[in-house]
Image (cartoon, rainbow, N blue to C red):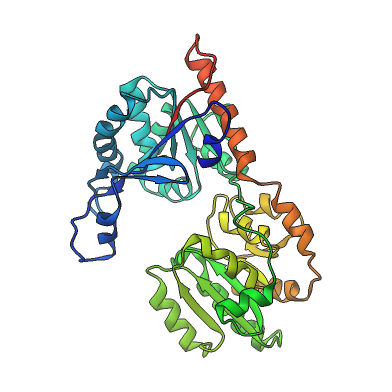
Amino acid sequence: MTNFAKLNGCKVKVIAPVPYFPPINLSWRSKYSQVMRREIREGLEVFHPRYFITPKIGMSLYGLKMFLSVLPTVKKIQKNFDFDIIDAHYIYPDGFAAVLLGKYLRKPVVVSARGSDINLFTEFPVIRKLLKYTLRSADHIISVSGALKEAIVQLAIPGRKIAIVPNGVSMDKFFSSPKEEARSKLSIPNKKVILSVGNLTQNKGFDLLIKALKILFEKFYEKNLYLIIVGEGVFRKELEKLISTLNLGEHVRLIGSIPHQELKLWYNAADIFCLASDKEGWPNVILEALACGKPVIATSVGGIPEILCTKNVGLLTERNEHDIAMKISIALKFPWQTNEITQYAKEYTWHRAAISVYRVFKSVLDGYYLNHSNLSQISH
């Protein structure tokens, strides 16, 4: 939205609701109580109303609860900011709440599918119905990839209602810099470094990367390999146990969570980037790695084949440790051209994505308001 707000004539207010949690340090959810109700981020005014959830149960009510919690904030904003359109990212619960807001306020709504909202939630019968209601009720849908668009079409949504707008990458934040300098700052040994980034959940396949590393040592006779995994999550203990069982303690490093702005150093310190997910939309981490000039090895799922559509920037792999190991071995020997990789990443900027989104909004407004000709104010 920051890049969209920079376009001529566009104004944005952001509402990013967070779950309510009392200011008591009982679990990781206590961090929600520390979120400010209002803040300015990158020049945008952002509101954080609270909504009530019951962890792990009652998910079918999250969208309704979000709508009821957000409505007072939206009505207050509207007094001085009579927006034209509502834009929601993530189909459920955010998109569902946005559709209800649109009906209540008589405003057009555009919802954006990011990946897991369609790929995962369609497996739950009740949530699947809410997803379909949201997709049918929205005035238009944005999909980050062609593969995700096809998944939406499978929910009986007309393809003409869906625009493909891939995610972008901030080239001013992610760019190539000397590997040795990055490794020095991060205290990374002079080895062949494989990097992966993501939440430590089973679907991300970090266990497959660890097993692939063992195969690289034993069957491909690779030496001096070092796997770095950046991220935190519920699967950490299982990964630590696997690392110990395979006797890879000296070759695998679990970094934990780090600020997004610091990721650039880790990308630049690596030799290759790997992603072994079983489901994806359009992974930002792949574009960030490419922007830093790093070749990517990733599973052929979701929109990933649409990103890695040329062998000059990376390789696709089957989702098993043996094929991952083979592709990593090939990648470590291939003469990748850093400039060619970074130049490819420049085709996917957030500015380019913002212009595509602008066109979607304008077409929706032209159809929704017969007498409306200027796209002046946008509410998210």
Indicate the position of residue 176 as horizontal and vertical percent values.
69, 63
Depicted 259 relative to depicted 213: above or below: above
Q: Is residue 334 left or right of residue 85?
A: right
Q: Is residue 19 left or right of residue 214?
A: left
Depicted 281 relative to depicted 66: above or below: below
Indicate the position of residue 262 as horizontal and vertical percent values.
52, 65
Indicate the position of residue 80 as horizontal and vertical percent values.
34, 24
Q: Residue at x 52, y 35 (%)?
A: 5
Could one spot residue 56 in this view of the protein? no
Quadrant position of residue 327? bottom right
Quadrant position of residue 67? top left
Could one spot residue 8 in this view of the protein? yes
Q: Residue at x 48, y 75 (%)?
A: 255
Q: 223 or 184, which lies in front?
A: 184
Total numbered circles:
0
Q: 191 or 300, which lies in front?
A: 191
Indicate the position of residue 70 as horizontal and vertical percent values.
28, 36
Q: Residue at x 61, y 80 (%)?
A: 184
Q: Is residue 351 left or right of residue 233?
A: right
Tell me the quadrant of the picture where the C terminus can be found. Answer: top left
Depicted 191 relative to depicted 5: above or below: below
Q: Residue at x 60, y 44 (%)?
A: 350
